[in-house]
Image: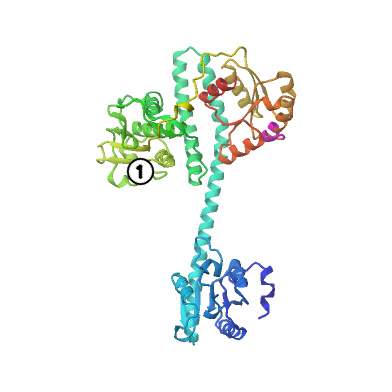
Amino acid sequence: MMAESSAAEVVPSAEDSLRVLILTPTGRDAALAEGLLNHSGLSCYVCSNQEELRREIAKGAGCVLMAEEALPHDRAVSWRDLFGPEPAWSQLPVVLLLARGHAQKDLALLRTIEKRPSIGFIERPAQKRSLISALKNAIEARRLQYAIRDALDALQTADRRKDEFLAVLAHELRNPLAVISAAIHIKKRRSGDRVDDDMLSAIERQTQQLTRIVDDLLEVSRISRGKLELHKERVNLVALVREVFEKGADKLQAGKHRKQFYAPSTELFIEGDPIRLGQVFSNLLNNTAKYTADVGAIDVTVTQDGCSAVVIVKDTGVGIPPEMITRIFDIFTQVDRNLGRAQGGIGVGLSLTRSLITLHGGTIEARSGGADKGSEFIVRLPLSEAPDASNVEPAQDTNERRASQTKVLVVDDDHLVGKLTGELIASFGMEVRVVPGGAEALEVIPKFQPRIVFVDIGMPGMDGYETVRRIRQLPGGDSLFVAALSGWGQAEDFERSAEAGFDRHFVKPIKIAELENLFASVT
C-alpha cells in the first residue's frame, strides 16, 4: 500500500491513532491482511520492518497484528525492544499469529511476551471472523486507554491551573497583608495605649491567621508536586516543642485550657527543619485548642521509644467520630462543625502536618474514643546520632553591637507597601530610604551607600530581576546584601531570584523574626 508514504510527516488524527499496524515477514501476507481489515472497516498500516513499527506506534496505534515469523530470534529481546517505551497509562494490544500446531521458532521469547495482559494469540489458519473480532476487541481496549490518557492530561492541566491560581491569589493577598502587618508592628512599637494594644493584638492575630492560610495552601501544593525542600539541621526536639507549647500556637495561647508539658529528658535530638517542625507542632496544638473547650485539658509529652522521639498531644475535647479517624488527615477534611467547636480554617492544617512529618521520615497517628471523649495525636520521628565534638562551632558573641546605624534601601513600586516597609525597618534603628523603582535605586545607591537593599520583584518597567542584575554591576554592588521582598513565593520563584543574583528571597508579609535574624547576621 502506497498511501502510507507520507505518514511519517503527518500527525495522525484521532481515528488514525486507532489503526491496526501490520508486520508480517512477506508482502503477500501483509497485503492479504490489509485487504481483509479494510473490507471490515478497520484502518490499517503495513510496516516493512521492526524499526518502522516502533516509529508508527509512537505516532499512535489501536493495536498491532504480527506474525510469529516477524519476531526477532534474539532471546534477550524485551517488550520495550519490540514495541518501544510506553507511558504509565498504556498497554498496547498485540494480536500474534502463531504457526500451525504452535511450532514456535523462539519459544523462550514467546514465553516472555505471553505474560503481558494485552497480548492475544491466534493459531493459523485463522478464521476471518475470529481475527476481526480479536482486532476489534483490542481496538476498543485501546480506545479506553486513550480515554484514561485524556482524563489524566485533563487532571494534570487542572492541577497546574490550580497551582497557578493559588500562586496569583497568594501574590495578590500578600501585598495588603504586608501593609497591615507592617502597620501593626509600627503602631505597637510606638503606642503605649493599653486599649489600643489589645485592639492591635486582635488585628495582628487575624492577619497571622490569613497569612497562615495562604502559606498552608501553597505548601500543600508544593508538597503534592514534590517541590518543598527541607533545610535540615540538628534540632533538640524537646526544646522546640516546649517553645511552641509556651510561646507559639496562638489558639493555644489565647485559650484558658489546663495545660501541662512533660519531658523526662531535656534533650532529644533529631535531624530536621526547625521551621517546618515548628509549623507541625503549631498546627497540632492549634487544632487541639480549636476543638477543646477552655475548661478542658491539653497535655503534651515528649519522650523516647527505642530509636524514635515521640511527641504525644492529648486533649479532653470533642473527640473524633470513628468514621473520621481514617479521614482526619485528608486535605479539606474537618471534624463535624455541628460538634460546636469549629473556629474557621479550611481543613488544610492536619494534611500539611502529616506531609511534613512524612518528609522527615516520621509518622503521625490519631486516636479517639469517639465524640466528646477527647483525642490523641502521636508523632514519631527518628532520633539522630550524637554529633562529632570536633565539628561543633564555638558560640558567637551575642553582646556585639552595631557601631553605627545600618543603611537600608527599599525598592517597591507600591507607594503604601514601600512606605510602611521602610517605617517598619526604621523601627529597628536602621537608616532607611524608599524608592519606587529600579532606575531610582540605581541612582540612589552610589550616593546613599546602603548595606542592605530590599527589592520588590513584580515592578513595571525594570522588574526586580533586572534591578538586582544592574545593582551587581555597580562599583561595590557585589558586596551589597540584596534581598527580594515579593508576594511571589513558589519554589520556582526562589530559584529564579537566586539565579538573578539575590542573596535571599523573603515573602510578603515579612516576619519580624526574619528581619531580626537578618539584621543580626548582616549588620
Seen from the viewer's position, the closer of residues 139 and 289 is: 139
The residue wearing badge 1 is 328
Tell me if I can see residue 258 in this picture.
Answer: no
Q: Residue furthest front?
A: 390
| In the depicted structure, whether residue 113 falls above or below residue 102 | above
| In the depicted structure, whether residue 480 falls above or below residue 276 | above
Q: In the displayed structure, does residue 271 sit left or right of residue 325?
A: right
The quadrant of the picture occupied by the N terminus is: bottom right
Report the magenta residues as a range.
461-468
Where residue 179 sits in the image (x, y, percent)? 56, 26
Where residue 75 sits in the image (x, y, percent)? 51, 72
| In the depicted structure, whether residue 128 falls above or below residue 253 | below
The number of callouts visible is 1
Residue at point 43%, 33% (across, down): 279
At label 1, the amino acid type is: Ile
In magenta segment, residue 466? yes
Where residue 358 sits in the image (x, y, percent)? 41, 42
- Classified by dominant secondary structure, the portion drawn in magenta counts as helix
| In the depicted structure, whether residue 332 falls above or below residue 116 | above
In magenta segment, residue 156? no
